[in-house]
Image (tube, rainbow, N blue to C red):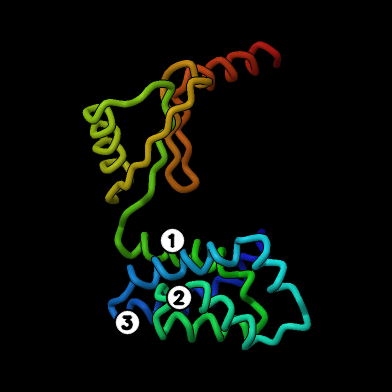
Amino acid sequence: MAELTTLARPYAKAAFEYAHSESNLQTWADQLAVAAGVVAEPKVAQLLSDPAKTPSQLSALIIEIMQEDASSPVANFIRILADNRRLLLLPAVNGLFSQLKANLEASVDVEVVSAFDLTDAETQKIVSVLKGKLNKDINVHTMTDASLIGGVVIRAGDMVIDGSVRGRLNKLAEAMNS
C-alpha cells in the first residue's frame, strides 16, 4: 500500500496544484472520484492489466465510461496516467487529492459510530468539541453499530477516540490478563 501511495503522490500533487490554480478543486475532486470508481471495477481493472492494450486505448476506455464526468483537463490527466501505465493508481491519487483539498480547506471528515442513533443535538455537541480540539471544520458522518453496546467511536484521520462500552470492556480484559 505504501508503494502505491508513493507512486500516486506526485500525480495527486500535480493534479491538485493545477486544479487549485484554476480554482476548480471541487470539479476535479468529483471527476477523480468517478475515475477512481471506474478503475476500481474488477472488469475494468482486468482490462487495464492487459499488456496488449495500448495506453491510448486504455485512456479512451476510461474517458468513454466516464462520459460527461470527464472534463478536458481531467481527460488529459487520465491520458498522462495511461501513457505512464499508472491508471491503476487512480484510487490512490483520488485519496491523496482529497486529503490535499481537505487540508487546504481546513476541514476534516469525521466518522462517528455509535451504539444507537444520535440525535441532532448530540451530533452537534460532538462536532463543536472536535472543532475546538482540531481547529478545523468538521464534516461528520454517523453510523450505528449495536455491537458497541453503548458510547461512541470517533475516527478523524489517524486519530481514533474509543468511548464505547465494548472498547472499555476490551481494555479491562487486557488489564486483567496482563
The tag earlier along the polypeptide, 3 or 1, is 3
Question: Which residue corresponds to mark 1?
Answer: 99
Residue 29 in the image: state x and y as whole percent: 40, 67
Separation (CA) of disc 3 from disc 1: 17 Å
Q: Quadrant of the C terminus?
A: top right
Name the residue type under label 1.
Answer: Gln
Q: Nearer the viewer, residue 70 or 21?
A: 70
Does 104 sit above or below residue 129?
A: below
Number of numbered markers: 3
* Label 3 vs 2, first from the N-terminus: 3
Q: Is residue 121 above or below residue 52?
A: above
Q: With respect to residue 117, does 47 lie above or below?
A: below
Amino acid type of the residue tagged 2 in the rendering: Gln
The amino acid type, in three-letter code, at marker 3 is Ser
Residue depicted at 21% across the width and 28% down the height: 121
Asked which quadrant contains residue 99, the reply is: bottom left
In the image, which disc is placed on residue 21? 3
Question: Which residue is at a point 52% across and 72% down the rendered structure image?
Answer: 65
- Residue on which the image places disc 2: 67
Q: Secondary structure at mark 3?
A: helix
In this rendering, the label closer to the viewer, 2 or 1:
2
- Left or right of 176? Residue 94 is left
